[in-house]
Structures are given as C-alpha cells and as structure tokens.
Amino acid sequence: MVGVPLLHPDGEGDRESYVIWQEQVSPAIVVEFLSPGTEAEDLGHFFAKPPKPQLSNSPPSKFTVYEQILQVPHCIVFNKRDRALRYFKRVRGSYQEQPVAASNPRIWIADLEIGLAIWQGVFAGRPKAWLRWCDENGELILTDTEAALLKLRQTVVNLQGMGMAIAQISQITGIAEDEVGRMIEDFENGRS
C-alpha cells in the first residue's frame, strides 16, 4: 500500500493486512480475483450480463465501493479460468476500462511506476498462471527468493571462474556438489 508503513501500527511486527478506518488512506490499486459466483459484483456495470437490481437497503457492490466510496485510482480484475486481465482506471470520477493485450497481457501503471503481468510458472510447488509485478518493459520483478538464488548462482559461477573445483565451491557455499554442477551447466548453456 502506497503511503502506509510496513510495520504494524501497534508495533507488533510486520502487518499482514490493513484496514481503511485505521489507516485513513485508500489503496492506490485493487487487484480482484474474479469468482464465478460474484462476477457481477466484481465487475460492476462492466459485467457482460445486466447485474441484478440492488434493493434500496442493500450494501453497495465491491466495484461501487472501489470506484465511488474509496475512489481507488486503479482496479485490476484477473479471471484465472481464462487467464484474462482487465484494467479499470478512474477517470473524472468513474472507472474507464483500459486496453490490455490478449496475448502476453500486462498492465503498466505509470503514476505508480509498476506493472502487472501474467506469468506461467511454478510457485510454492504449484504450476499455473500467476500475477507478477513487472517493470515498464514487462520484465518480472524478482521475488526475494528468486533474487537470492540468482546471487547464489552468480557466486557459484564466479568461484568456478576463479578456478575453484566443484567440491571446493560446494564446501564454501554449502550447496551439494551435484547442484553446483547444475548451476554451472545452466550458466554455460545460457539458462538461468
């Protein structure tokens, strides 16, 4: 969240969430994962079928809350079933859908200097399509784990380039010899 500290306001360590009424700051972006049963609410008046009329005493839809009450500047909706990404930008008080390419869908949000793309890969042992933050060129922003692994691989390659044997590299880094060998082989073959 832009403008909200990472630590919990009570000093209880890292926060897992925030609430508007405590922070007094609306989100700069909402990412909504489309659910088959709540598509009309998730997409508001952009839903293909006309939404069910709301009773006068019923609460506003999520989409209305984002657009009119919280006035969130950017709303992104991801449909994991068909891997479709939709982007709604608040312009003059209401959301206007922005174009997103059907092939290689990604969104660049200039005022936040961040993008969102669909990445097909394995995360937490699950192979599927994932949303990933990216830069202006669509290059994925590495997770902390990916960045650490990249540094570790570079260290292995550097040590090997200094003439160290795989056994020595294994001993220094604590990585099994066969894994050190794979890292060097991947580097030599242009795989990261």
Image (cartoon, rainbow, N blue to C red):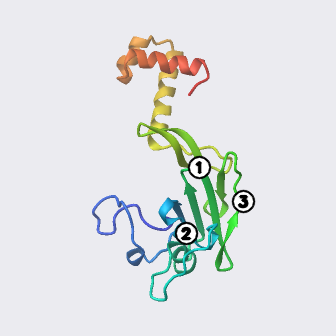
Quickly name the residue at label 1.
83
Residue that extends furthest to the bottom in the rendered view of this protein:
56
Q: Nearer the viewer, residue 135 or 92?
A: 92
Q: Is any atom of residue 118 visible in this view?
A: yes
Residue 40's tag is 2
Element type at marker 2?
helix
Q: Is residue 76 left or right of residue 59?
A: right
Q: Residues within 10 Å of mark 2 (few under 14, many from 20)?
A: many
Element type at marker 3?
loop
Q: Nearer the viewer, residue 164 or 99?
A: 99
Q: Nearer the viewer, mark 2 or mark 1?
A: 2
Q: Residues within 10 Å of mark 1 (few under 14, many from 20)?
A: few
Q: Residue at x 41, y 74 (%)?
A: 23
Quadrant (top left/top right/bottom left/bottom right) for the C terminus: top right
Residue 99's tag is 3
Whole-percent x and y of residue 140? 59, 44
Q: Residues within 10 Å of mark 3 (few under 14, many from 20)?
A: few
